[in-house]
Image (cartoon, helix red, strand yellow):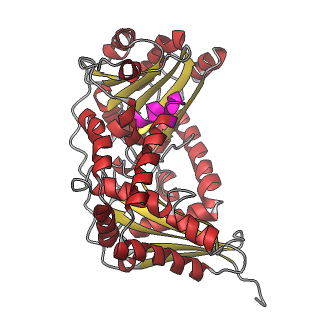
Amino acid sequence: MRSDPNRLRSALLALSLGIFSSTAFADTPEKKEWAVSHFTLENGMEVVVIPDGRAPITTHMVWYKVGSADEPPGKSGIAHFFEHLMFKGTSNHKAGEFDHAIAEIGGNNNAFTSYDYTAYFETVPSDALESMMGYEADRMRNLVLNDEVVATERDVVLEERRSRIDNDPSALLDEEVSATLWQNQPYRIPVIGWMQEMEELNRKDAREFYDRYYTPNNAVLVVASDLDAETVKAMAERTYGKIERGPDLPARVRPVEPEQNTKRTVTLTDERVSVPSLSSQWVVPSYNTAKPGEAEALDLLSEILGGGLRSRLYQELVVKQGIAASAGASYNGTMLDATSFTVYGTPRGEATLEQVEQAINKQIERIAKDGVTDDELEKAKKRFVRATIFARDRQISMANMYGSALATGATVQDLQEWPDRIGKVTAEEVRAAAVRYLQPSISTTGYLLPTMKAGN
């Protein structure tokens, strides 16, 4: 796992960047500048082209609709492990040749795996785009997977787990909280995998995973570039278009989460921790599973409750009471299945973790009882709109938005309609979301505590 841009709410902010089918470009100068093309190659590969004429630079991304939540039982970590294997040699290019070609032209590349998708990308001069497409198309089907390659890279991901998870108390607690929050859904399994299962992954596992999921009809190509859509389409047809379509995959139906009806706590005490902290989570619907308007209300609830320096949690706990060094909330609505809503806090000075937790719960209770003001709601909506404008500053951000949304089940129409749906959310709908979902009696709370020394 080289990186993980998993702040997925922002994916839906792509709406105001203007997403249109290639046959339905709007005619105003502003909309023409940001009009996005969307089409499908004959082999089933979906393509999105985002115009960005500021410089002759292109971001090229391939999103596979497979993540850790799609892994077979007992094979946790195979999605992330396979992401690593994709940087090995193919029958046409030896290992490292792709990376070397990118470095030679001053570009950069990376990849990441999440619960619902795996993505690979390069940012390069635009005249190198077709070359990048050629390399990516080649490793989509021609990867060399022998026992030596698989064993070597398995050692790498095992070491990555030790470094990123086992040596980090906060990461260990996050892993345990997820395994407690989710009782049946595969989101309870860490993306990187459980150590004992990672150790058993082999060439056969890798080959089966590759053959099943790495096909053009299970991928979305996203290109943000100064090149026009017809040029990009012609390149895609000459490279990806030559790959044979794979077997149709069944619908991504996963185990359904049972009704949440208990309060659960997870406590990790570790001598490496100097400042305690807590986070509480609830299972809530994502944009894919919510009733009309609920996900939008949860997005705005997250923003008002703990979305930044103007949020209720920050203003009350950090600024006014001075009992917290940090406090906030988050909602990740861009998931294939249900998702989580999180609040968190860290005490400051002489304040205790219990005081911070009580203060957080009080702010949730206030919203559930009295709702939010019209002024708060309108300001939250405006911050969302501003975020869409800022997102235009980075090619990779734009490509991430489109890729993550389409890889998790969103349609072009969903994206087009999202700004209007956000604009229609009422204060009562935000209050109702807090009442329905943020009940302390069904929360899962993780406490990260320092080890008490003798005499304390």
| Quarter of the image where the N terminus is located | top right
Q: Farthest residue in the front direction?
A: 375
Q: Residue at 56% across / 16% down in the picture?
A: 55
Is most of the magenta stretch helix, strand or loop? Answer: helix
Query: Would you say residue 328 sits in the magenta stretch?
Result: no
Q: Is 386 located above or below residue 322 in the figure?
A: above
Task: Say left or right for 107 vs 415.
Answer: right
Task: Say left or right for 107 vs 306.
Answer: right
Q: Is 164 located above or below residue 283 in the figure?
A: above
Residue 46 placement: quadrant: top left
Q: Residue at 43% across / 38% down in the picture?
A: 118
Task: Say left or right for 269 vs 396.
Answer: right
Q: Nearer the viewer, residue 220 or 386?
A: 386
Q: Is 278 located above or below residue 416 in the figure?
A: below
Question: Is residue 179 something one can see in this rendering?
Answer: yes
Q: Which of 62 and 208 is in front in this view?
A: 62
Q: Is 427 located above or below residue 226 in the figure?
A: below
Question: Is residue 173 something one can see in this rendering?
Answer: no
Estimate the x, y position of residue 151 in percent, counting from the top left: 55, 40
Estimate the x, y position of residue 60 in percent, counting from the top left: 47, 23
Residue 300 placement: quadrant: bottom left
Q: Which of 80 and 228 is in front in this view?
A: 228
Q: Residue at 45% across / 35% down in the picture?
A: 400
Estimate the x, y position of residue 24 in percent, counting from the top left: 24, 20
Estimate the x, y position of residue 435 in percent, counting from the top left: 32, 72
Magenta range is 390-403
Q: Nearer the viewer, residue 5 or 14?
A: 14
Query: Would you say residue 397 sits in the magenta stretch?
Result: yes
